[in-house]
Image (cartoon, grey):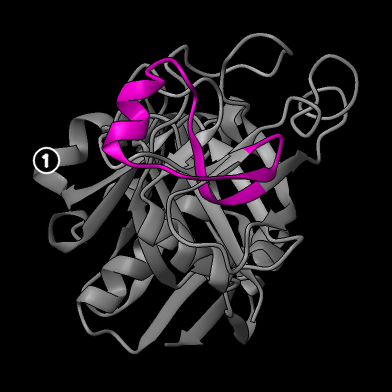
């Protein structure tokens, strides 16, 4: 089954998931100390959709030193690190990334591959979970070997500027409801008395926050396995936020031991949910004047 990677710059995490959103692994990483950016010479980590263009280093020992993607014959040790304190160490394995969005992270002066942006191993003394690289994505060597062995060339990699959290309505309502109000009530014309209901209080909620901490997306999971109230701000659509929210809701469902998931999809969003393994399970119907269809997934 095809896999995909998501790297969160605010969260400093890398997640490996299967094509239907199941979490396979989560690792701490370190991205650029200078933040996010796509321009050549910026020493920033590029955002957006990428693929693994090449895998380099299979079979070499952990801590093998690479320069220009070739092993130097050195093995990193604390003594070698002390001897060359200013070297930007690329160790163990390399997953060379290539952007897939022309004009943003591919071609011209904003080309991820020609900037030589990698997911690579780093010395054991590197602090992970906080920015510190020169643009690449640094990982623990043992975890990188595990990731390297699990992914193939062409694996999708999305580098995002948002983070996720889960919680009860009492914890997230002040952030989630204004967002739902904007999307459902003002944008889609859903009546207020239909948007707020008694199920919020008993549901698990997920929230996506942008780089400034402002809410950009939300969704909920009812105790009986119903997923709903998925909303993403217009300016954040098409950037993987909805996918990440569903991923997080699937994690919540797995933790709760739910085997059957149900949602009422707006017709234009049905293809989106099919990518997560949901299938139509009922006729089309109207809800708040908007065409919907029920979809289910067995986990």
Question: On the picture, is 222 further left or further right than 100?
Answer: left
Question: On the picture, is 164 further left or further right than 170?
Answer: right
Q: Who's the residue at 65% across and 70% down the image?
A: 275
Q: Is residue 3 above or below residue 139?
A: below
Dot 1: few (<14), some (14–19), or many (≥20) neighbours within 10 Å?
few
Q: Residue furthest left?
A: 170
Q: Give the quarter of the figure containing the C terminus.
A: bottom left
Where's residue 34, x and y in %? 47, 11
Question: On the picture, is 200 further left or further right than 95?
Answer: left
Residue nearest the viewer, comparing 133 with 296:
133
Q: Is residue 212 above or below residue 26?
A: above
Q: Who's the residue at 45% across and 68% down the image?
A: 146
Q: Which residue is mark 1?
A: 171
Q: Who's the residue at 56% across and 17% down the image?
A: 44
Where's residue 90, x and y in %? 53, 37
Where's residue 257, x and y in %? 23, 84
Q: Is residue 253 above or below residue 125?
A: below
Q: Is residue 131 above or below residue 57?
A: above
User: Does 83 appear in magenta?
Assistant: yes
Residue nearest the viewer, comparing 23 with 225:
23
- Range drawn in magenta: 67-95
Q: Who's the residue at 71% across and 31% down the image?
A: 116
Q: Quadrant of residue 9?
A: top left
Q: Is residue 127 visible?
A: yes
């Amino acid at each position: 089954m095809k896999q995909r990677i998501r790297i969160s710059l605010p969260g400093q995490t890398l997640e490996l998931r299967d094509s239907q959103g199941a979490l396979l692994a989560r690792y701490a990483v370190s991205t650029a100390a200078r933040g996010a950016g796509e321009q050549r010479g910026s020493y920033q980590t590029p955002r957006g959709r990428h693929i693994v263009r090449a895998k380099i280093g299979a079979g070499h020992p952990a801590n093998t030193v690479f320069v220009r993607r070739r092993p130097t014959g050195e093995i990193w040790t604390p003594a070698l690190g002390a001897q060359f304190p200013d070297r930007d160490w690329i160790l163990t394995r390399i997953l060379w990334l290539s952007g897939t969005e022309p004009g943003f992270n591919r071609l011209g002066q904003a080309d991820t591959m020609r900037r030589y942006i990698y997911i690579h191993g780093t010395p054991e003394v590197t602090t992970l979970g906080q920015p510190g690289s020169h643009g690449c994505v640094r990982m623990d060597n043992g975890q990188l070997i595990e990731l390297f062995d699990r992914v193939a060339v062409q694996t999708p990699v999305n580098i995002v500027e948002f983070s996720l959290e889960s919680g009860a309505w009492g914890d997230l309502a002040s952030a989630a409801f204004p967002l739902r109000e904007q999307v459902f009530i003002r944008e889609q014309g859903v009546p207020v008395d239909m948007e707020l209901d008694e199920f919020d209080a008993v549901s698990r909620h997920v929230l996506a926050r942008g780089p400034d901490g402002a809410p950009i997306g939300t969704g909920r999971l009812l105790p009986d396995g119903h997923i709903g109230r998925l909303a993403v701000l217009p300016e954040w659509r098409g950037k993987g936020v909805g996918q990440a929210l569903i991923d997080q809701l699937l994690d919540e469902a797995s933790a709760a031991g739910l085997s059957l998931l149900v949602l009422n999809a707006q017709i234009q969003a049905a293809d989106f949910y099919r990518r997560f393994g949901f299938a139509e399970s009922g006729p089309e119907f109207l809800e708040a004047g908007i065409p919907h269809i029920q979809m289910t997934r067995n986990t």
